[in-house]
Structure formats: C-alpha cells, structure tokens
Amino acid sequence: MDQKLEGLKAEMERFGRENDAARDEVSRRMRNITRESAEFLAVLVRAVAASRILEIGTSNGYSTLWLAEAALADGGTVTTVELSGFKVRLAAETFARSGIGRGIIQLHEEAGAALARFADHSYDFIFLDTNRSAYPAWWPDVRRVLQPGGLLVADNATSHADEMADFIKLVKHDPLFSTCIVPVGKGEFMAVKSRESPLEPPVQPQQ
C-alpha cells in the first residue's frame, strides 16, 4: 500500500466533505463518490483487467486516483474529462502530488464533444459521474466507444434515481447490454457490452 497516496485520498475525503457542507453553489461542490464506491471501482478495474479507462466528470480527481492506481497495475491509463476550469486546476494539483500522474490523461472540455471525437472501441471501462441529464444524449457515443465486452459504470443510481431513470431505461432496453444496479455508496449502475454485437461482425475462431 502506498502510504503517501492513501494519505492524499484521506485528505481529499475530508476536503470534499468540508467544502460541500460550506458551499451553496453546486458548481463549486466536489460531490465525490464515497470511499465504498471508490474501492468497488478499483476492484472492478482489476477484476476485468481494464487498461483503457474513460472517466466523465473529474471533479477534484478523487475517483480518478482510485481508477488510475488500479489501472497502472496492468500498465493502463485513465483519461478523465472535466468542463469546469476550477475543478481541472484542483485535479491537476492532486495528480501532481499523487505520484501516479503518469497514468492520467486530463482533458479540459465538454464531455459530449470529447465523446464524439473518440474512435470506436477506444475504452474498455467507462465511468460516468457528472451531469446526469446529459447521459441519454451521450449514449450513442458512449455505446460506440466502449469496446465489446467492456464495462460501463454510472454513479448515483439510487441517490438520484429519478434523474437516472431515463438513462437506465435506455441502456436496459439496448440488446447489446446486460445491466444491474449495485447498492454500493450512492448506487452504481453497471452495464456490460456484449462481446459479439449484432451490429459488428463476430470474432471468428482461429482455425
């Protein structure tokens, strides 16, 4: 266990709680995932040996650290997208202190624009934790950039069930995906993309 990194995580947890309790302006709140969810994500990354991870919604970089630490175990990287310049700067400072910044690619842009320019099957693990109302509009590109067999996870599935309902319904009715909700932290919606998509030619076994 990296004691320096663990100390930074604990510091960020305290900062997130104190900052959010003191801020009325939503855009200045960190709204980090819970430690329970962070640990769950890290285990998932390791379990599926994900090496190309996409995070939409960096905030101050708390969840990114957990994802990157797990990804680096298999030589992977995390690309994290954030629109708020204020949060991009906070996250950059976090990553510089973490000792694992080599495993993190930071993008300061609108998530829909970023998704639109990513190539098909660019990522094997996607984590959504940002503007929930935008998820349905992003779905065609999220679906496209996730590789067959890849895993999608979205936070707040139970804490903001009403806001997530349309997106969850959309994904659940997509024949390429198998889904479930895991009651960890604020609720994690999980969707696995079929390895043999009917919209893509199946992989033929070698003779």
Image (spheres, grey):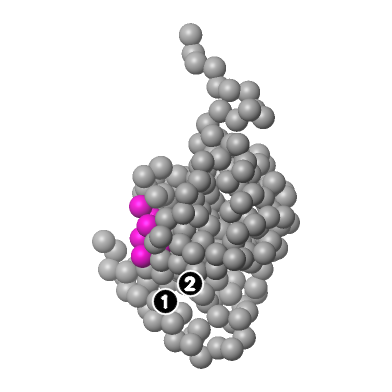
Give the quarter of the figure containing the N terminus. Answer: bottom left
- In front here: 8 or 26? 26
Is label 1 in contact with label 2 (beta carbons under 8 Å)?
Answer: yes
Q: Would residue 181 be visible to someone looking at this image?
A: yes
In the image, residue 41 above or below residue 160: above
Look at 36% across and 65% down and name the residue there: 36
Where is mark 1, residue-wise? 12
Which residue lies at the image location 62% right of the left edge and 79% below the top edge? 27
Q: Is 186 rendered above or below residue 116?
A: below
The part of the image, by quadrant, that contains residue 165 is: bottom right
Q: Which residues are magenta?
A: 36-43
Q: Residue at x 58, y 43 (%)?
A: 146
Name which residue lies at 45% across and 44% down.
50
Q: Amino acid at mark 2?
A: Asn
- Judged from the image, the secondary structure of the residue bearing numbered disc 2 is loop
Residue 117 at x, y percent in the picture: 72, 48
Residue 129 drawn in magenta: no
103 left or right of 112 in image: left
* Relative to 82, residue 139 above or below: above
Pick out the residue farthest to the top.
207
Q: Position of residue 49 (x, y in %)?
A: 40, 42
Residue nearest the observer in this picture, 177 or 18: 177
Which tag, 1 or 2, sits closer to the chain's start? 1
Q: How many marks?
A: 2
Q: Mark 1 to mark 2: distance in Å?
A: 9 Å
The residue indicated by pointer 2 is 32
Q: Is residue 42 magenta?
A: yes
Across and down, in percent, residue 148 comes to: 55, 35
Residue 131: % across, % down = 64, 66
**In front: 182, or 65?**
182
Kindly report the secondary structure that dominates the magenta region of the rendered protein. helix
Residue type of the residue flagged with mark 1: Met
